[in-house]
Amino acid sequence: MAPYMGAPDEQGDGEKLKLRQVHCSGSPYEIGFKHGSDAKVQVERTIDFYTGMFQDTANLDWDKVRGVAMTYEPVMRQKWPHYLEEIQGVADGAEVELSDIIACNVRTEIAFGMFSDGCTALSWRTADASWLAQNWDWMEPQKQNLIVLTIEQADKPTIKMITEAGLIGKIGFNSAGVGVCLNAIKMKSMDPTKLPCHLGLRMVLESSSREEAVQSLAKYGIASACHMLIADATGGIGLEWSSSDVQKCTMNDSHQVFHSNHYLLKHPGVGQDTNWLADSEFRVTKIEELAGKIEGAPTKEKIFELFKDESNYPGAICRAAKPPSTSASLFHITMDLLKKRADITLGRPVAPDDSVQLAF
C-alpha cells in the first residue's frame, strides 16, 4: 500500500489553504469533544494519513496499530487520566474510535520513533524579547489537517497551539508566556511506562514557567527520543530525550539555543541516534550562522527571514518535498514569549498559504 497522499482537499485550482481555528473550554472531555466535532473532517483525514504511513513504512495495518495503541490506555488512565478523558472527547466529537485517537497521539512511540517529523528551531532571549521559533517539516498531505487550537481550562494557563487535528499536544505557547517547539530524533528507543512525546508537549503548555515544565517532564520521563525546546520570558532550554535519559542544551553566551534533528550532546549508555536526515547538521549550523549576521536587535521580521533560507535546497531550513527530500516545511511559528504573542504562517515561509496572529 502506498503512503496516504491526502484526500482531495477543499481548495480549487490555485486556491490556498486556510488554517481552521478551534476554541475549546470546559472539562477535559468537553475540550476534546469541541476539538473533535469542530475539526471532524481534519481528524478523519489525519487518521487516513497515518493509516497509510504505518502500512507503507512499518507494514502495520490500522487494526494492528489501534491494538498496539490501546496498550497505552491503562498507563494513561493511571497516570494522566485527564489526557485520556480529552482524547475520549476528541474521538466522540469526531465520531471515531478511542483507539484511533490514542494511535495518533502516540504515533511516534508505536513504531519506536520511525515516524519522525523534521524541523529547525531556535530560542533567543534579548533585552526586550524572548523569541522561540521553528519550521515544522512533514509530509505535504498533512498540511490540510493542521489546526490552531485554543484551550481554556480551570486552574491552568490558556493554551494556543498549532497541531495536527486529533493530537492534543504540539507546538505553541500559553498565557503564562511558556512556549515549546519539537525536533524529532530518530532512534529505536521506547519505554511505554513514560510520557508519550506529544503528551509531553501538552504538559509543557500547561506549565507556568520554563522551570516548572522541566520539572514536570522529569517526573515522568519521555517514552521515545525527541528534542523539546522550552522557553519563557527568561530564555530557553533544550531537552534531548531518549527513553532512558535526558540531556540539557543550555543557552550560549548570546542567550541562544539552536537545534535540528540529531543529538547535539552525548548520551552515555544510550548510544547515538541514526541522524536520519543527512541535512540536519547543515541546518543547525546554518541557522546559527544566519542569526549571527543579524544587525541590531532581532525582530519577528528578522527571525522569519532566517527560516526562509533555502541554502542546501531541498534539504534546507525552508524545506521542499523534492527528491531526495520527502517532506516540506508545512508551517512556521515565531513566538515572543515576553509579549505573549505569536505569528503563524501555513506552508513554506517563502510561499505561505495563510497567516494567523495569536496573542494574550
Image (cartoon, rainbow, N blue to C red):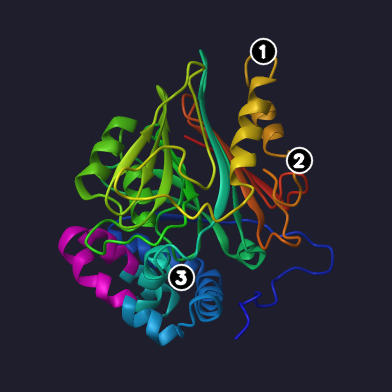
Instruction: Mark 1 or mark 2: name the one nearer the start of the chain.
Output: 1
Which quarter of the figure has residue 6?
bottom right
Q: Is residue 196 left or right of residue 146?
A: left
Q: Magenta includes 164?
A: no
- Residue drawn at (39%, 79%) of the image: 65
Where is residue 3 drawn, in percent x and y? 61, 77
The residue where tag 1 is placed is 296
Real-space Cα distance between discs 1 and 3?
A: 46 Å
Residue corresponding to mark 3: 37
The reply to whether callout 1 and callout 2 are in contact (CB within 8 Å) is no
- Using the image, determine if residue 340 lies above or below residue 27: above
Q: Which residues are magenta?
A: 69-87
Describe the element under mark 2 as helix, strand or loop: loop
Residue 343: x and y in percent read 60, 38
Mark 1 vs mark 2, CA separation in Å? 23 Å
From the viewer's perspective, tell me whether residue 299 is left or right of residue 276: right
Q: Is residue 152 visible?
A: no
Instruction: State how far apart marks 3 and 2 are (Cα).
Output: 41 Å
Relative to 39, does residue 2 appear above or below in the rendering?
below
Q: Secondary structure at mark 3?
A: helix
- Residue under the image location 47 percent in, 21 percent down: 252
Residue beneath disc 2: 311
Residue type for callout 2: Ser
Between 220 and 301, the one lying in front of the other is: 220
Q: Amino acid at mark 1?
A: Gly
Q: Earlier in the sequence, mark 3 or mark 2?
A: 3
